[in-house]
Image (cartoon, coloured by chain):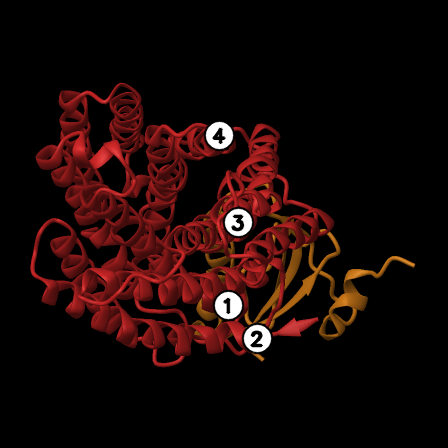
Amino acid sequence: MKTGTLSLDQAPPLSIPASFFLTIPFGILTAGLILMTSGIAALGSPWAPQALALTHAGTLGILAMGMLGALYQMTPVIAGTPVPYTRIAHLVHVLLVVGLVGFIWRLLGGPVAAMSWAIMAFKIALPAFLLPLGWALLYPATINETVQGMRLSVLSLVAITLMGLMMAAGYAGDLFPQYRMLWVQIHLTLALLGWVGGLIMSVSWQVIPMFYLAPATSKASKRWLFGMLLLGLILPFATFFASTETSGWLSPGRIAAISVMPAALVIWVLHPALVLKGIANRKRKRSDASLLFWKTGLGMAFLIIPIAITALLLPDPRWQVLFGWVAIWGWAGMIMHGMLSRIVPFLVWFHRFSARVGLEPVPSMRGLLSQQRIRIGFSLHASSVVLGGLAILFQVDLLAQLTGLVLVATAISLGNMLLHVMRQ
Amino acid sequence: MTKTVSDKFGVLGDETPAIVDLRDLEAPEPMEKILLACSQLGNGKFFLAHLPHVPMMLFPHLESRGLAWWVHEEPDQSALVLIRKGT
């Protein structure tokens, strides 16, 4: 039996997650504008500066914004420990925006100084985020699999940021690291599977039963999934200590890509299969448009490993670009968009109305956001995923620009939805 | 041996309130139902709910309304929450 001493002060103010979440439409808008102006140049090769700018508009401008906001919100709730000095989150948010702008500006032809400023901003943002949040995760009142997953995710974020900073220095007048391909492979692996995948998986264990009444994943399954994910994230590091000499097809970058398979299977096959099964077995099958995002995003996950294997086997760079597109926008971006359409109304209801329940009439959470608005956002998001995929496969400039246009429409739709809910 | 509700919550004594099962409700409906029920609770009376998980976000509201609460996590990760108005 436990009794509590939680106070309302322990939950972060709505302004903290809201500031991160409200920046996501700008991240999507940036990605759309890059595609509209660069066209197929941004989707031809993963090494093109326009492609790197597009990728990081997705990873930093969309995914990181949503994930940092979610971590600030969920850590006190799930770990039972408040994040100390939580208002530093506003500084982290500003630094992330400054860093992202400088990073993308430099890649699109801006001055070397833009990247130097971006690196400086990220260098300050990392400890400003890590120290308070890491403390709350290191000393939780409650420890469970979700807390473990969040720890792994944050640890991966630290590693990818440090690696990313060293690689970004190459665009700021310094040298790129030796064995750049290997660095990129590990950076990408930890980012997609550790940082993004670790958080999606662990948060889904909490939110899918809570919001959709799906059966909870068993503790044993969670432990297996977590163990396999950890193994798959550690193995690629072994390639650092193995031969770093290129030996034919089996280069260190490719060895790293193959050794990550246990983690890839967990994040892109086993976890989606378990969640989809759980959704199919919901206790109360109530219509909910946000589930469209979950089902589609988890369905897209099954495509990622086949595309990655094709990219490994074929020298055609289109498959590498398609891998990034499907993983960032089709899988993670889709799930994040769906989570926003469910979690933001919940947070607004919790912060603005829940304290008045029983004391005066309050609106229901579902009354804050119509299903129609969510469906419009889903249609635009799904259309952009398909159009982008076609643009990559057929390398048609007009399709790339059209994808950019639909991304802009998706950004407007999401921004409009978030503002509509937050103004209530 | 299966524990009774009184075993799980030592504060209950002889008075064992009926368990209100809220496990088939999605967030935030359980919180809504509990806060509504507690607003009508008599002084010194108990309210006992069975929830799908430990409701961390509910507790601050109970504290701010001056309600005492106890929670018992079940093996299936669901939770029994006992709430009392007044001392």
In the figure, A152 relative to A386: above or below?
Answer: below
Q: Nearer the viewer, residue A24 or A60?
A: A60
Q: Nearer the viewer, residue A103 or A357?
A: A103
Q: Which residue is mark 1?
A: B59
Q: Nearer the viewer, residue A326 or A166?
A: A166
Label 3 element class: helix
Numbered label attached to residue A256: 3
In the figure, A361 relative to A332: above or below?
Answer: below
| Residue A405 position in % (x across, y down) | 13, 30
Estimate how packed mark 3 is, as few (under 14), some (14 to 19) or many (20 or more) residues with alpha carbons within 10 Å: many
Which residue sits at x=29%, y=33%? Answer: A374
In the figure, A250 relative to A179: above or below?
Answer: above
* Chain corresponding to red in the figure: A
Q: Amino acid at mark 4?
A: Leu
- The label nearer to you, 1 versus 3, is 3
Asked whether residue A187 is in view, the answer is yes
Which residue sits at x=56%, y=74%? Answer: A140
Both labels 2 and 3 in a single chain: yes
Mark 3 and mark 4 residues within 8 Å of each other at the beta carbon: no
Which mark is first along the chain, 4 or 3? 3
Which mark is first along the chain, 2 or 4? 2
Q: Chain of mark 3?
A: A
Label 2 element class: loop
* Alpha carbons under labels 2 and 3: distance apart: 46 Å
Numbered label attached to residue A4: 2
Q: Which residue is mark 4?
A: A313
Estimate how packed mark 2 is, as few (under 14), some (14 to 19) or many (20 or more) residues with alpha carbons within 10 Å: some
* Alpha carbons under labels 4 and 1: distance apart: 54 Å
Which residue sits at x=48%, y=30%? Answer: A313
* Chain corresponding to orange in the figure: B
